[in-house]
Amino acid sequence: MHLTDKEFTTVVSEKMKGLPEDAIKEVMDFIEFLKSKKEKRGSPEAILRHLGAWKFEKGELDNILEDIQKFRELEG
């Protein structure tokens, strides 16, 4: 069965109607999972997708960045 983008969107939308909110969230999470599989690990797209999801204690991020810099200097 081959559908146009518009037909596919309509079919998916119809199937999602009436689903409970938690099931819709699960569908959306699965879509994001499928999209993320296409991103290369460490790519700007992969990193930006998680931006804002990270939470650090005050000063913790600065410490992490300092440690990264120290390791880079040791390698170089």
Image (spheres, helix red, strand yellow):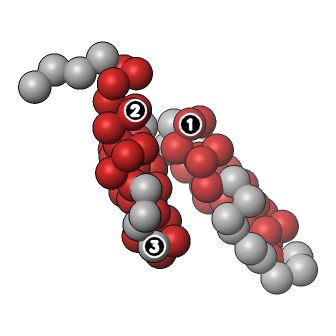
Distance from label 2 to label 3 (Cα)? Answer: 19 Å
Farthest residue, direction right = 58
Image point (88%, 76%), residue name: 59
Query: Which residue, given by chain and number where applicable, does mark 3 sit on?
Result: 20
Sequence-wise first label, 1 or 2: 2
Q: What is the secondary structure assignment of the residue under circle 1?
A: helix
Please name the residue shown 32% across and 30% down the image: 8
- Residue 9 image position (x, y, % from top left): 40, 32
Q: Residues within 10 Å of mark 3 (few under 14, many from 20)?
A: few
Does residue 11 sit above or below 71 in this rendering? Answer: above
Q: Circle 3 sits in a helix, a strand or a loop, which is it?
A: loop
Label 2 element class: helix
The residue positioned 69% from the left and 67% from the top of the image is 54
Q: Which amino acid, by three-letter code, is at mark 2? A: Thr
Q: 33 or 15: nearer the eye?
A: 15
Which numbered marker is on residue 9?
2
Which percent across, then down, holds residue 23? Answer: 41, 70
Q: Please name which of the two marks, 1 or 3, marks the residue nearer to the observer.
A: 3
| Nearer-N-terminus badge (2/3) | 2
**Mark 2: few/some/many CA within 10 Å (<14, 14-19, 20+):** few
Q: Mark 1 — residue? A: 45
How many angstroms separate mark 1 from mark 2 (CA)?
24 Å
Question: Is 10 rendered above or below residue 62?
Answer: above
